[in-house]
Image: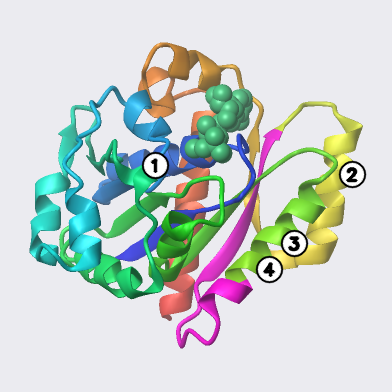
């Protein structure tokens, strides 16, 4: 059965979109099919990969039950970088998925689960219906934590949001915190990382993503990180993180 990874944090600019895109592409390049879903009404990822945003509201209609879930297939675009994506709709910001919509979103994703071993959801920086919809569908939650003083507070806020939202879900998602934008030779980052390790143990991913100019460079050129510089430190870290998630998954399956 495929895995659904939601990259989630209410904090803005912590690296969710960068992480979600790099992760999906790393799965795809590793021979594991991946579908990327831009759940952020802001549409940052959709713009980054150079897609025009549809303005048809089809996903919203499917969520409301006005169109059948099988129609979700019409939303998929294939990029020449080997990644399939459901772009964010231009009208998504005017719609707030409700609890009643969450089940239909999961049913829509079920349409793809035979085709894609990994489905990656890029959530918006909020606690809105799109974020909760992503969270409720996820088997894995990845929380990027920027290497800075308030990382601990941010981690506990996201974990609280996850707990409150999933409630009594029978199969709670597995949460992994990902330390990112780590500066070299920076004692503050190192202290924060030590703290997080002590607090969260195995819930903190082993992979650490360094601050790397290849990421803003790629964004400026309208390319994904792995397309722009596969050998960059950040790209290698994300490939490593994809492997960490796959191994994690195998260990759980045993
Ligand atoms: N490891 C990194 N090294 C350097 N810059 C990075 C790194 N990760 C992300 N960035 C830069 O940080 C900014 C925010 O990243 P990104 O858009 O991925 O965050 P986000 O959490 O999705 O933001 P939002 O909350 O607005 O959706 C971008 O300009 C991106 O290029
Ligand atoms: Mg984003």
**Mark positioned earlier in the residue sequence (1 or 3):** 1
Q: Disc 2 vs disc 4: Cβ atoms closer than 8 Å?
A: no
From where the camera sits, is residue 38 visible? Answer: no
Vertical relation: 204 (above or below) 93: below
Specify few, some or many for label 2: CA neighbours under 10 Å numbering under 14, 14-19, or 20 or more.
some
Q: Give me the C-alpha separation between circle 2 and circle 4.
A: 23 Å
Q: Which residue is mark 1?
A: 41
Q: Which residues are magenta?
A: 163-181
Q: Nearer the viewer, residue 108 or 68?
A: 68
Identify the residue shown where x is 55% and y is 72%: 165
Quarter occupied by the N terminus: bottom left
Vertical relation: 47 (above or below) 158: above
From where the camera sits, is residue 167 visible? Answer: yes
Q: Is residue 211 left or right of residue 4?
A: right
Secondary element at tag 4: helix
**Circle nearer the viewer, 4 or 1:** 1
Q: Which residue is mark 2?
A: 191
Can you tell which mark lies on residue 160?
4
Q: Give me the C-alpha separation between circle 2 and circle 1.
A: 35 Å
Coordinates of residue 48 in the picture (x, y in percent): 37, 25
**Mark positioned earlier in the residue sequence (4 or 1):** 1
Q: Which residue is mark 3?
A: 156
From the Cβ of disc 1, is ligand 1 less than 8 Å away? no
**Circle nearer the viewer, 2 or 4:** 4
Coordinates of residue 101 in the picture (x, y in percent): 31, 69
**Mark positioned earlier in the residue sequence (2 or 4):** 4
């Amino acid at each position: 059965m495929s895995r659904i990874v939601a990259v989630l944090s209410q904090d803005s600019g912590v690296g969710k979109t960068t992480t979600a895109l790099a992760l999906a592409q790393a799965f795809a390049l590793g021979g594991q099919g991946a579908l990327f879903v831009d759940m952020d009404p802001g549409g940052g990822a959709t713009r980054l990969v150079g897609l025009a945003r549809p303005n048809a509201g089809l996903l919203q209609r499917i969520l409301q039950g006005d169109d059948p879930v099988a129609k979700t297939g019409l939303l998929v675009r294939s990029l020449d970088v080997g990644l399939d994506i459901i772009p964010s709709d231009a009208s998504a910001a005017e719609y707030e998925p409700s609890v009643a919509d969450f089940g239909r979103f999961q049913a829509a994703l079920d349409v793809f689960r035979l085709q894609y071993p990994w489905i990656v959801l890029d959530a918006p920086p909020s606690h809105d219906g799109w974020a909760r919809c992503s969270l409720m569908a996820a088997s894995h939650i990845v929380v990027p934590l920027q290497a800075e003083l308030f990382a601990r507070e941010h981690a506990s806020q996201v974990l609280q949001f996850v707990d409150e939202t999933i409630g009594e879900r029978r199969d709670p998602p597995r949460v992994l915190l990902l330390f990112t934008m780590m500066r070299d030779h920076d004692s503050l980052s190192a202290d924060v990382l030590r703290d997080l390790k002590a607090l969260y143990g195995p819930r903190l991913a082993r992979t650490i993503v360094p601050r790397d100019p290849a990421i803003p460079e790629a964004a400026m050129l309208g390319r994904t990180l792995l397309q722009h510089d596969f050998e960059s430190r950040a790209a290698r870290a994300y490939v490593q993180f994809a492997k960490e998630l796959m191994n994690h998954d195998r260990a759980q399956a045993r």
